Image: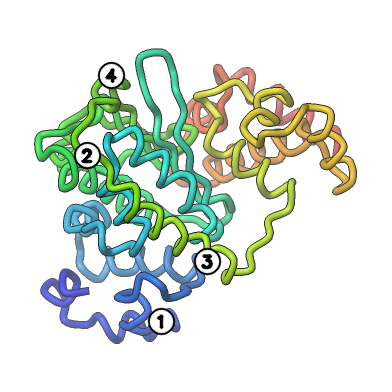
Amino acid sequence: MHFLDKITGKTDLLLASHGLLRSQLQDPYAVVPMARYVAFFEDAALLARDQSFGMRLGATFKAADIGPIGMLFSLSASIHHAFQRLSKYVNGIQSATASGLMEEGAHLVWAYDLVDPDMWPRRQESEFTLAASCQLVRSCFSRSWKPLEVHFEHAAPRDPAPLERFFRAPVLFDQPGNRLIMDKQEAEKLHRLEDMALIGVLERHVADLLRDSGQAESVTAKVQALIAISLGHKSITLSSIAADMKLSPRTLQRKLDEEGTNLRTLLQEHRQAIAELHLSQAGSSHKRAAQSAGYSDATSLWRARRRWRQSQ
């Protein structure tokens, strides 16, 4: 909040307009409704007259800002282990989000998305999160670290140069999701010996926080989260999703049947929501909407939209 105070001096008024308190954003244990949090970021950028507000705030991020999860990140032996721990715990603590680490040949992909596509615009929150993740790596492992590529789901800003300078990497827009692409070999390099006793204490603490949160996600919600982070980077099949959930394909299908849905329907709903959202934005195109929704080209999206209309 000191960052916003320096720029505008109207932080408390802005927080009040979104029903938030300064203490909530300063406390890593506080519960903040995600919709208010996202809207706050967008309005803060407007108030600061800074299109890169989220990124600049993320550049000041510290491990302690996310409590014990940040400490686990900082104590990890490698960047790979750090992101594994982050993906293991952050979804349970932070509702309405999906994140995960995927292997793609010689690359690792750290994916982060808000599950609800109607929570839009959300550019500032997305840029903040990826910038904060990058800053965590630099502060905990190597100040010279840089990803191979950075992907954002939103359209390109008027001036992408500040993002490119911060990440020190190509930044792509209108992608299926928000991603940090990193070199797997570099990510697996050992930087320290892990203090397993301290890590065990922190993991026990995080597990207690997860139980206290009382968030028991449905199977459908878990599948939706996996679709959100996998789209465009990983084959989405019953077998692949079941493997991620440590279930057999048959068990996953049965559980989805019990909740009145199936993988094909959930994937279609996600793609449809993403495509329609992008097409509703001024200046968007069918080509960019197709790319964001994970289709190979605008023709494939056109055919899909025709099927959606026929099924309604």
The foreground one among 133 and 53 is 133
Q: In what element is the residue under mark 4?
A: helix
In this figure, which residue is indicated by the disc labeled 2? 160
Q: Residues within 10 Å of mark 4 (few under 14, many from 20)?
A: few
Q: Nearer the viewer, mark 4 or mark 1?
A: 4
Q: Which residue is mark 1?
A: 20
Q: Give the amino acid at mark 1.
A: Leu
Distance from Cα at disc 3 to Cα at disc 4 = 34 Å
Query: Which residue position holds label 3?
Result: 208
Q: How far is the residue under mark 2 from the one under mark 3? A: 41 Å
Q: Which comes sooner in the sequence, label 2 or label 1?
A: 1
Residue 46 falls in which quadrant of the image? Answer: bottom left
Residue that sits furthest to the top in the current view: 105
Dot 1: element: loop
Q: Which numbered circle lies on residue 155?
A: none
Q: Secondary structure at mark 3?
A: helix
Report which residue position mark 4 lands on. Answer: 185
Residue at the image position 43 percent from the left and 79 percent from the top: 18
Disc 3 residue type?
Answer: Asp
